[in-house]
Amino acid sequence: MSDTNYVTQENFDKLQVDLHRLKSVDRPAASAAIAEAREKGDLKENAEYDAAKEAQGLLEARINYLEGVVSTARILDETTIDTSRVSILTKVTLLNLSTKKTVTYQIVSENEADLKQGKISVTSPIGKGLLGKVKGDIAEVSVPAGILKFEVKGISI
């Protein structure tokens, strides 16, 4: 995981808390579950042991993933964001030229993307298509459904 992960301080803190919990609470619990299942007899026919080992493998994969994200994180300061152009952490108000509907999205890192909250990833087709645009620009975004045209109505924090 060599790519830089752009995150807010709030998201970085959440990642660290989650990682700490996985290492200090969930990892010992997984080890205890394996030990308990091991005591129940023959490991070849012990479904509980197999399930505990699989859960431990998933837990270790999640820990490794979070460690990679935290180690490559670059914390962005919202006070230094330039709102003259669309960039990561900016909120962009767009007019969909085909439907005439206005939407507002915040451009965030992949880890923070949540469409229900209006946060789209900087690496998504729309996020990529909007980067660098200024107020009044028309962004043509290629998505699986075709080409979408958006007019940038406003950029803010």
Image (cartoon, helix red, strand yellow):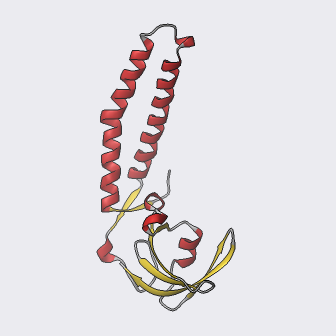
Residue lying at the far top in this picture: please name it. Answer: 41
Question: Could you say which is closer to the camera, residue 71 or residue 119?
Answer: 119
For residue 94, side relative to residue 26 (left or right): right
| Residue 12 x %, y % | 34, 56
| Residue 99 x %, y % | 60, 83
Position of residue 40 relative to residue 80, above or below, is above
Position of residue 41 relative to residue 130, above or below, is above
Residue lying at the far bottom in this picture: please name it. Answer: 136
Q: How many marks?
A: 0
Q: Quadrant of the C terminus?
A: bottom left
**Image-quadrant location for residue 155:** bottom left
| Residue 49 x %, y % | 48, 19
For residue 98, side relative to residue 63 (left or right): right
Question: Could you say which is closer to the camera, residue 8 or residue 126?
Answer: 126
| Residue 110 x %, y % | 48, 60
Q: Tell me what residue is drawn at x 57 percent, y 12 percent.
A: 44
Q: Tell me what residue is drawn at x 30 percent, y 60 percent.
A: 10
Q: Tell me what residue is drawn at x 39 percent, y 17 percent.
A: 35
For residue 55, side relative to residue 126 (left or right): left
Question: Could you say which is closer to the camera, residue 111 or residue 69?
Answer: 111
Q: Tell me what residue is drawn at x 49 percent, y 35 percent.
A: 58
